[in-house]
């Protein structure tokens, strides 16, 4: 090759190298492999045992409605509806205690929010905290702060409330009252006047049932005589049990017992309520689950039955809540958590409460679903002084509650007011609330 051509060849080689460098990279015929994301959690299956004492009219149907919502969302879960009969859960709690102590908990169980759960199972290390669920589901934004406090201990939340009940309600047969020209009594003195009129007409003034309903009546007499602040102070030690004011309340309770049916000890709460429906009795003091029973018997609020705060307790809301928790060693934990999500959901609570005769624990319940009475309860809950129920687990530890139950039982047998007051004072001292 001529030396004259060397520069030309060199230039051609350099140009070819530059063109090769600028050539675009071919597009691959297949998309690049991307690392897979985490698969969504599988929907729970298997068995779920839901333990409760909801067997009476209204409450059983309310539970069935909430279970229907759960089954629609989690069709692969086989629900075992385990109910134990016994008013206010007295028998059911005994069965539950045996199972929990034996290491055989149900998946989830009904329990009264507050001391009943915390002082029995939380302090024993038998429950799993549910604060994480409140944060995930946004419940802290839709449940009142005061309710969250009742559900909490040691900085954790321990159960999911499905409702709010009111204990201090007087229910009455409207036709009986109209026939006698009576109005529902607003004070205990008015009650005694009304009761005398009814007794003279051969009608039982006030229906009453088994032991726990007697304690329920007792706490409403305390509230209606003392007022909300002094009543609440009984459970904190701020109100002494040996004062003249408490003596007056105990005397009121003594007088009330003169106007109840003689067979009270043989009746369950719903059988006592049935006396009002039959017209055998005119009034019954019971929580607002009684409204669910009335409706189950095809009575209409404001038509066949009426209601008012128990005498003397206007402006007070004696509150309790049914809730469900997560046992620390619960079988099928995923299904339990799914159940708790439904319990705390708007859909679950709005399915359950209108039938049960209670109001939702959430503040965003669909008001149009609730009847005249329940809407009035919603209104009262938003403005009345809220006090905790003793008989239904919110006011005191179970051991103190049992001491009061025992004292009431003894008093009904001997009607000795002085001895009754001494026993109640001793119970407060034993609980550590009184000096």
Image (cartoon, rainbow, N blue to C red):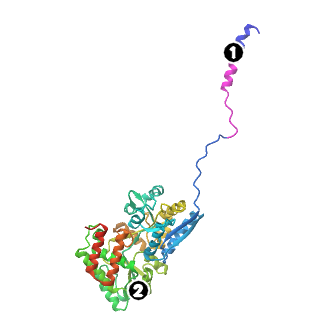
User: Left or right: 106 with respect to 169?
Assistant: right
Residue 33 or residue 54, whichever sits in front: 54
Which dot marks residue 175?
2
Using the rendered view, name the quadrant where residue 197 is placed.
bottom left
Report the quarter where the C terminus lies. bottom left
Residue extent of the magenta highlight: 10-30
Q: CA distance from mark 2 to mark 1?
A: 116 Å
User: Left or right: 291 with respect to 225?
Assistant: right
Residue pointed to by mark 1:
11
Q: Residue furthest front?
A: 102
Residue 358: x percent and y percent?
44, 71
- Counting residues from the start of the chain, the first of labels 2 and 1 encountered is 1
- Would you call the spot at circle 1 few (<14 residues within 10 Å), some (14-19), or many (20 or more)? few
Secondary element type, mark 1? helix
Residue 253: x percent and y percent?
30, 80
Using the rendered view, name the quadrant where residue 26 is placed.
top right
Secondary element type, mark 2? helix
Secondary structure, magenta segment, majority class = helix
Residue 234 visible here: no
Using the rendered view, name the quadrant where residue 178 is placed.
bottom left
Residue 385 or residue 167, whichever sits in front: 167
Residue 330: x percent and y percent?
51, 62
Q: Say whether residue 115 is magenta.
A: no
Report the quarter where the N terminus lies. top right
Vertical arrangement, residue 322 with respect to residue 7, above or below? below
Vertical arrangement, residue 145 with respect to residue 82, above or below? above
């Amino acid at each position: 090759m001529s030396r004259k051509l060397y520069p030309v060849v060199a230039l051609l080689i350099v140009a070819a190298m530059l063109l090769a460098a600028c050539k675009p990279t071919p597009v691959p015929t297949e998309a690049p492999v991307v690392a897979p994301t985490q698969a969504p959690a599988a929907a729970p299956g298997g068995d779920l045992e839901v333990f409760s004492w909801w067997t009476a009219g209204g409450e059983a149907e309310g539970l069935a409605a909430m279970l229907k919502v759960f089954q629609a969302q989690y069709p692969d879960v086989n629900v075992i509806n385990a109910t134990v009969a016994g008013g206010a859960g007295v028998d059911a709690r005994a069965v539950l205690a045996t199972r929990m102590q034996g290491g055989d908990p149900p998946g989830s169980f009904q329990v009264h929010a507050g001391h009943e759960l915390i002082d029995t199972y939380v302090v024993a290390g038998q429950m799993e905290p549910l604060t994480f669920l409140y944060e995930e589901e946004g419940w802290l934004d839709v449940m009142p702060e005061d309710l969250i406090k009742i559900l909490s201990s040691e900085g954790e939340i321990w159960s999911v409330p499905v409702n709010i009940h009111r204990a201090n309600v007087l229910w009455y047969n409207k036709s009986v009252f109209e026939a006698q020209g009576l109005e529902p009594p607003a004070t205990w003195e008015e009650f005694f006047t009304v009761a005398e009129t009814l007794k003279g007409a051969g009608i039982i003034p006030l229906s009453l049932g088994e032991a726990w309903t007697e304690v329920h009546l007792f706490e409403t007499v305390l509230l209606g005589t003392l007022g909300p602040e002094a009543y609440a102070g009984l459970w904190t030690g701020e109100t002494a049990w040996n004062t003249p004011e408490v003596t007056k309340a105990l005397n009121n309770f003594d007088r009330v017992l003169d106007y109840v049916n003689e067979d009270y000890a043989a009746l369950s709460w719903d059988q006592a309520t049935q006396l009002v429906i039959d017209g055998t009795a005119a009034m019954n003091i019971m929580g607002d689950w009684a409204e669910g029973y009335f409706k189950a018997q095809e009575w209409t609020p404001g038509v066949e039955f009426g209601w008012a705060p128990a005498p003397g307790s206007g402006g007070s809301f004696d509150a309790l809540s049914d809730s469900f928790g997560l046992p620390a060693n619960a079988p099928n934990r995923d299904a339990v958590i799914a159940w708790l999500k439904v319990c705390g959901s708007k859909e679950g609570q709005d399915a359950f409460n209108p039938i049960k005769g209670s109001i939702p624990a959430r503040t965003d319940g669909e008001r149009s679903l609730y009847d005249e009475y329940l809407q009035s309860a919603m209104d009262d809950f938003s403005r009345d002084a809220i006090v905790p129920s003793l008989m239904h687990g919110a006011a005191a530890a179970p051991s103190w509650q049992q001491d009061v139950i025992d004292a009431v039982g003894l008093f009904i047998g001997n009607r000795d007011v002085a001895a009754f007051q001494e026993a109640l004072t001793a119970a407060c001292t034993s609980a550590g609330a009184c000096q």
